Amino acid sequence: MFKYSQAEKIKYLLSLISFSFIFVTALPNTYLLQIADTNKVQPKDTLSRQLSDSVIYKKENFSSEELIRGERLFYGLVYLGDKSINCEACHNTHVSDTLNWNPDALEISRKYLDKNAYYLSKVLLKPLGTKMKQVHKGFQLTVQDIVLIKAYMNKFVGIGLKKNKPIITNLLLLIIASFLFLLSSVDIVIRKVYKSQRINWAILTVMGIVITWILAVNAISFGRAKGYSPAQPIKFSHAVHAGQNKTDCNYCHYTARSSKTAGIPPASICLNCHFLVRNGTRSGATEIAKVLKAYDDKKPVEWVRIYKLPDFVFFSHEQHVSAGEITCDACHGNVKEMNRLYQVPDLSMGWCINCHKTRKVNLSNEYYKTYYSDYYESFKAGKIDSVVIAGIGGRDCGKCHY
């Protein structure tokens, strides 16, 4: 057993106090060093560390090389880590007649044109909608990448969607046929290069038939728009509403039973459902938000009309829907399967007349009982079994042309 003197005990106690003081003093500094080391290994650019007034986000002037890199990032031509992110895969850069639930590149570019790149970064890296969370999951973009993508999107507003090249087969054929017809005519009348004029007359005959056929076909189809399917301001799908959700056509087009026109539903009709339904399974909240904004701004949605008859033609939905009991698909096709609505018939007079010549009327209908009582009594007595529309004036010129 060791024995310490009083002086040694005091010395030992002082040493213990000094060691404790040094340890307590050094502890915070050690903790701060650990934090500093941890910060060094954090990702260089994270959304939470960037401020809305960041110098990088405020950058407005870009070199041609930076714009090229922004374009390559947008089209997925640059690998970020082990994969690329192709914005074009979801957002159309070309005019399309097929419904794409995602907004096209021009639409989103215009939306963020006057906004800071910071707002774009929030949508890309931390989207709120369920649909966008699924699509944007795993995105790894630095602040610099997002700023360059935003720079190209600003440029894209001026570029716009690329249009498909028009088909000029008939026009080209007409030009060639007209040229050969003219050449043969000149040779017959003036030059007379060929001793036997049979070749020229053969060319004149064939080209004359071709020219007449092209002009006749295009003249007949002039003013008709079969297959017309314009892009609408809101991507409304009849397949979703009328097909999947089984919404009655007359619920939205409520004037079809009592008016000349079926009418275009106002935004207030949409709000009957979408006051609660704010997020769709296909488009997310993007398209529904447009309806809500139009309603809040008290501005009508500028839908593009698809079916339009000439001014000299009278047509009444009330007569066909209520009196004639004709279903919507008889004229508009199977809209329950159409995402993007298009014009089914050519709306020619022949198309209407053929329908009037073959479609039978329901003589038990209250309308026909009242206005065509003679036919109804004959039908009731068994003298006639049916009457087609043409038999009760459906082919009279004054019925449609007044």
Image: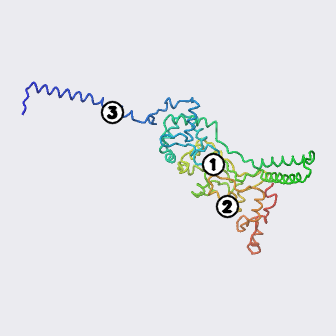
Q: How many marks?
A: 3
Q: Relative to residue 341, is residue 4 drawn left or right?
A: left
Q: CA distance from mark 2 to mark 3?
A: 75 Å
Residue 20 screen position, x and y as percent = 21, 29
* Residue 295 marker: none
- The residue at which mark 3 appears reads as 34
User: Which residue is situated farthest in the front direction here?
Assistant: 195
- The residue at which mark 2 appears reads as 327
The kind of residue tagged 3 is Gln
User: Which residue is situated farthest in the bottom direction here?
Assistant: 382
Between disc 2 and disc 1, the foreground one is: 2
Task: Identify the mark nearer the N-term, 2 or 1.
Answer: 1
Which image quadrant: the C terminus?
bottom right
Between disc 2 and disc 3, the foreground one is: 3
| Front-most of residues 86 and 129 | 86
Residue visible at 74% across and 70% down in the picture: 386
| Front-most of residues 194 and 300 | 194
Contact between marks 1 and 3 (CB within 8 A): the answer is: no
- The residue at which mark 1 appears reads as 266
